[in-house]
Amino acid sequence: MDHFELRDGALHCEDVPLADVAAAVGTPVYVYSAAAMVRQVAALRVALAAVGDPLIAYAVKANPNAAVVATLARQGLGADVVSGGEYRRAVAAGIPAGRIVFSGVGKTEEEMALALGGGLFQFNVESVAEAEMLSAVASRMGKTAPVGFRINPDVLSGTHAKISTGAAENKFGIPLGEAAAAYARAAALPGLRVQGVAVHIGSQLTSLAPLEEAFTRLGGLIGELRAAGHAIEVADLGGGLGVPYDPSLPPPPTPEAYGAMVKRIAGGWGARLVFEPGRLIVANAGVLVTRLIRIKPGAAHPFLVVDAAMNDLMRPALYEAWHAIEAVRPRGSRMVANVVGPVCETGDTFATAREMDSVEPGDLLVFRTAGAYAAAMSSTYNSRPLTPEVLVSGGRWAVVRPRLDVEALIAADRVPDWL
Ligand SMILES: *Cc1c(COP(=O)(O)O)cnc(C)c1O
């Protein structure tokens, strides 16, 4: 049950026919199900019920739309933010400042001051140099920054190289072997209160083994740090749990299995646990609706040229990602085709030799599992309007980001008077 299903032969989001949204708003358009997000939050809470009162901090970068973040704020979630902009979005959407975790390797003094001024749960600090800058900013403001170091546990996450973050060669975190010295240094800095440890080893993980390995290493470190006199009260276990994109592949571990593993490894740590799920909450709550412009003959298979492109949904071009493609009103027959967008790049290819619903020019299609890292990464490349977003709840729907049209794009540019 994913809240996108066929009723009377037409694909609906909850109780709303996708064709109605496309007719009113145009295509391409992202459509999100509020019920699907709420269900994912509930499933994760149940899965984590055995580990006390965890802070579930939604990773805002997965889908930063204000209506999406507000939906999750109403469910009591916190936020994991990676920029001053995301911090401001989280607060504006109603996430209490005390539930915000600030991650990222490149926090600037301005971003640190913003979060210190508004308050937050914890900075996840990724280097000693960052700890020193944060201490200086906090001291100038007469504040004390709550911090944990993000540890790079040097595990192979088994995911796509571009979304792996916990291997030694990745830019994230401080190496386990340097942790003791980093905590000693941070404890001596006047503007910091050292309270936690953090890991996040990558995204779209399809096995629990690398997570278990990372958490086990983190548990060992917590013991060492406490023995050295640091009060470690918080353990942030990051996000990364994968979601099913391709139904022909084995499904990723369930939240239940993840929760049981966490309980086994971290249940006895005596620390407040923090989780930073992004994709798990929103990926399957969204689709990108597109219209077939024309069919162009190809060497092996026809090209279906749709009106969505790599600027709207970048994941296939960026990570060779696979998205299910379905007709909004299936004709009952099947075809094999290449699905491409209109952008002038060969990378603007959504699927090659895909066995899929037969479609004809003018038909609507959807890219499934497009709620995470999709609209968030969209751009206006090729001077294409920025794709609108729609939120559905039951039989209601609303445009939660209007299409940013080409007039607005042109108006944002300035031609200097000396030209
Ligand atoms: C992106 C990110 C997440 C969320 O990852 P998902 O795979 O979407 O769960 C969590 N924590 C940090 C630090 C991140 O950068």
Image: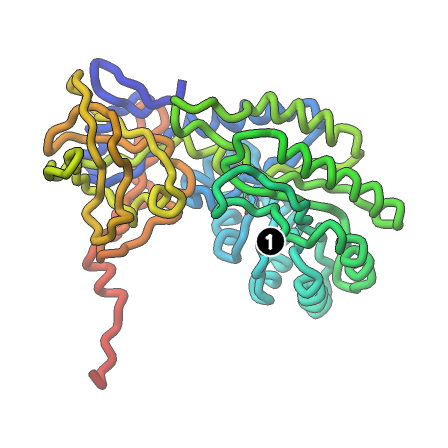
Q: Which residue is mark 1?
A: 169
| 411 versus 373 height, above or below | below
The amino acid type, in three-letter code, at marker 1 is Glu
Query: Would you say residue 166 is visible in this rendering?
Result: yes
Residue 12 position, x and y percent, is: 28, 23
Q: Which residue does the image show at 76% across and 52% down from the upper left?
A: 177
Residue 173 position, x and y percent, is: 64, 52
Quick one: which residue is furthest to the bottom in this view? 418
For the N terminus, the quadrant is: top left
Q: Which residue does the image show at 52% across and 42% down from the upper left?
A: 59
137 relative position to 23: left or right: right
Residue 235 position, x and y percent, is: 71, 40
Q: Which residue does the image show at 74% across and 46% down from the upper left?
A: 196
Comparing 314 with 139, the one in front is 314
For the C terminus, the quadrant is: bottom left
SS category of the residue bearing label 1: loop
Coloration of the structure image: rainbow
| 231 versus 211 height, above or below | below
